[in-house]
């Protein structure tokens, strides 16, 4: 994308081709904040589902395995077995949670970017070491927005923590006066409430960031009128070149038709506006075939070439117009015109038999 183009001159929406090119280069609207919020929400859900089994498993280790290990002489083998037991219990309880977190992060990324690997994004670019461009990125509007979101996150975390502490100060002060189990339950409730509020704040921030990233992406993709014209030329071809190619094609078709006129059986004229050359060879044609046709100056060339080649030229205005408008070059005449054409060709044969050239 042309980053150095004046943004005010980009007045046109991005074309499908420009969007596809940008996607191939890995340029897509992507919000890392949205991924973080999704992972945080998934973590809360996972802990709500698997937190109790995890706590019970770890509590079982501390209630049974550790006391049992210290009943006798503690050896190095006992320590290794205890560590292995703790690791196994922790992993078996944490793996589902980690799997959910990974799935949430991957799913959110795929929803935004799709399944796409972009080698261009992995290439090392030396301009990233350029201090001038580095300062440009540092003080760009995008950096300001990113910094603002960072400040907003800090304020959100601080505000949520302050709100939880102030609203639950009684519960917090009573933690040291009850049982250990009661303190654990109360602490878990505080942590859960704090996580829920933080998740709500993270979702709000991620929505703001995603909307900004989307708008920024659309702004960067916009095109100038000149870019639209250049893309149209690349996609559809230069209009002048296309016109020239069409002209060359018409000239080739005319030359081909003129080469067929000397082989024609008869040329039918309007007499001045149209000229149609028909060939009827009983050894190859099931019906008369139109081998050349023209209007105006080209019709005159057909008539002139026919006379020079000894091909009969017959004036039949209605028939000439009908053939010109209804039959393409190289095609047999339609059945509707068989009788009129057959009578004309029969007349040509009779005149030739009498030694007369029409």
Image (tube, rainbow, N blue to C red):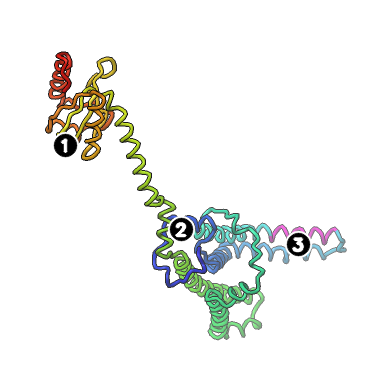
Please identify the residue farthest to the top as the structure is shown: 353
Q: Is residue 48 visible?
A: no
For the record, the magenta segment spans 77-90
Q: Mark 1 or mark 3: which is in front?
A: 1
Answer with mark 1 or mark 3, whichever residue precedes in sequence.
Answer: 3
Answer with mark 1 or mark 2, whichever residue precedes in sequence.
Answer: 2
Crowding at mark 1 (Cα within 10 Å: few <14, some 14-19, many 20+): some
Q: Give the SS element for disc 1.
A: loop
Answer with mark 2 or mark 3, whichever residue precedes in sequence.
Answer: 2
Q: Mark 1 or mark 2: which is in front?
A: 1
Which residue position is annotated with label 1?
A: 272
Tell me the tag on residue 65: 3
Spot occupied by residue 138 in the image (x, y as percentages of width and height):
60, 76
Crowding at mark 3 (Cα within 10 Å: few <14, some 14-19, many 20+): some
Q: Nearer the viewer, residue 351 or 99?
A: 351
Seen in the image, is 147 located left or right of residue 350?
A: right
Which residue position is annotated with label 2?
A: 19
């Amino acid at each position: 994308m042309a980053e150095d183009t004046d943004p005010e001159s980009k007045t046109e929406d991005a074309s499908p081709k420009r969007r596809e090119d940008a996607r191939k280069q890995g340029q897509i609207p992507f919000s890392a904040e949205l991924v973080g919020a999704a992972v945080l929400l998934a973590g809360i859900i996972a802990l709500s589902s698997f937190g109790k089994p995890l706590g019970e498993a770890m509590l079982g280790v501390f209630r049974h395995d550790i006391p049992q290990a210290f009943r006798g002489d503690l050896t190095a083998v006992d320590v290794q077995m205890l560590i292995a037991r703790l690791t196994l219990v922790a992993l078996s309880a944490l793996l589902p949670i980690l799997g959910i977190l990974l799935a949430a992060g991957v799913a959110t990324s795929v929803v935004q970017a799709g399944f796409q690997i972009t080698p261009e994004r992995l290439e090392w670019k030396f301009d990233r070491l350029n201090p001038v461009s580095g300062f440009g990125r540092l003080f760009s509007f995008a950096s300001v927005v990113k910094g603002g979101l960072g400040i907003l996150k800090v304020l959100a975390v601080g505000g949520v923590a302050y709100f939880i502490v102030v609203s639950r100060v009684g519960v917090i002060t009573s933690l040291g006066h009850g049982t250990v189990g009661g303190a654990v339950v109360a602490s878990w409730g505080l942590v859960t409430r704090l996580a829920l509020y933080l998740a709500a704040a993270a979702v709000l921030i991620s929505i703001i960031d995603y909307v900004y990233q989307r708008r920024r992406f659309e702004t960067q993709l916009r095109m100038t009128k000149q870019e639209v014209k250049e893309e149209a030329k690349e996609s559809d071809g230069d209009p002048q070149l296309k016109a020239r190619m069409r002209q060359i094609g018409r000239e080739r078709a005319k030359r081909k038709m003129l080469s067929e006129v000397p082989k024609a059986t008869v040329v039918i004229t309007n007499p001045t506006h149209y000229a149609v050359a028909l060939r009827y060879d009983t050894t190859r044609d099931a019906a008369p075939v139109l081998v050349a046709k023209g209007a105006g100056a080209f019709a005159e060339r057909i008539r002139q070439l026919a006379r020079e080649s000894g091909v009969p030229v017959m004036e039949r205005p209605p028939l000439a117009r009908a053939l010109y408008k209804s039959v393409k070059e190289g095609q047999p005449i339609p059945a509707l015109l068989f009788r009129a054409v057959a009578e004309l060709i029969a007349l040509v044969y009779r005149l030739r038999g009498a030694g007369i050239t029409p």
